[in-house]
Amino acid sequence: MEQYLKDLIEQYKLATGIKSIDLQSEEFVTDFTAWLNERQQIAKNYAYFLDAMELHFAYADCAEIGKGGYDTIVKPFKTMLITPASQSLPDSEFQNRVINGNVRISGNKPILVKQVLGKNQYKEIPRDIISTYITQNPAKASYIFGWENLHNTYRNRIIVGVYGNIYDKNREAKLKLIKDFKAKLNEGNLIDDYTTMGDNYFYAVGTDVEERKLERIRIKTDYDRESR
């Protein structure tokens, strides 16, 4: 939970360009709360954006990773949530959908990491239980480390994206993070899209819902949606 809040505060600082803050300041609390509320509104439109892309994110065999009550996009859906910030997700709204833990990728296998009696416990997550993994606005590139292996080996579907206000100071850095990630993905079963809506922007890459044959020829291109 503590790391979750640190990540949110760091994203707030990067988006606003504020270098230092006073966590005890009433002004910071007011501004940070308003920023979180704005992000939650943008997140609703981001979910519509993913739906228009026909990505598989609103179902019980999909898991949102590492998000909490302030930045989840799957509250209205059946999606599972795997997160160390489970305390920020009210039982009344997320009953039987939350697993307290995290996911790490080992080779091409998603591993559930849970703390049991102060020690990490590791368990592979079966594909017939969770077929798709989604996260958005990753605070660090390390948070999606290895996710390309799930997509490239057809082990699981993935959905990774960013959203925010077009005037955010870190907009270009966030778009670059996803573009760099996209460059690691096989194009043969990949969907990606970028759009703006008013003052908001949305960019996501994900695995096509349609099952593809392993023999399919994959064509890499230098296509850059931002440069169109």
Image: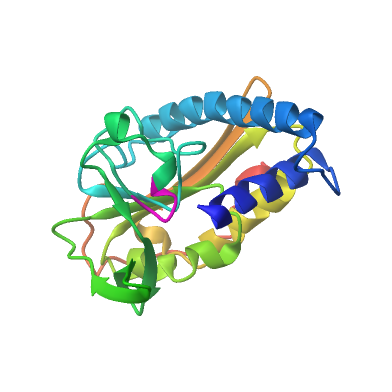
Q: Is residue 158 above or below residue 22?
A: below
Q: Picture coordinates of residue 225 (x, y %)?
A: 61, 45
Kindly tell me whether residue 33 is visible in this rendering: yes
Q: Give the left or right position of residue 130, taking residue 188 as reference.
A: left
Q: Is residue 10 above or below residue 94?
A: below
Instruction: Please report the residue visible at 76 percent of the width from the left and 47 percent of the height from the top.
Output: 14
Q: Is residue 74 above or below residue 83?
A: above
Q: Picture coordinates of residue 182 (x, y %)?
A: 52, 59
Q: Is residue 178 above or below residue 96?
A: below
Q: Nearer the viewer, residue 133 or 71?
A: 71
Taking the view exactly as shown, the residue that stands out farthest to the bottom is: 107
Q: Give the left or right position of residue 225, taking residue 105 as reference.
A: right
Instruction: Please report the residue visible at 49 percent of the width from the left and 69 percent of the height from the top.
Output: 145
Taking the view exactly as shown, the residue that stands out farthest to the right is: 19
Q: Nearer the viewer, residue 194 or 147?
A: 147
Q: Nearer the viewer, residue 88 or 80?
A: 88
Q: Which residues are magenta?
A: 82-86
Q: Nearer the viewer, residue 135 or 215?
A: 135
Taking the view exactly as shown, the residue that stands out farthest to the top is: 198
Judge whether residue 83 is colored magenta. yes
Instruction: Please report the residue visible at 28 percent of the width from the left and 40 percent of the height from the top.
Output: 79
Q: Which image quadrant for residue 133?
A: bottom left
Taking the view exactly as shown, the residue that stands out farthest to the left is: 128
Q: Which image quadrant for residue 54?
A: top left
Q: Picture coordinates of residue 23 (x, y %)?
A: 75, 43
Q: Tell me the quarter of the image containing the C terminus.
A: top right
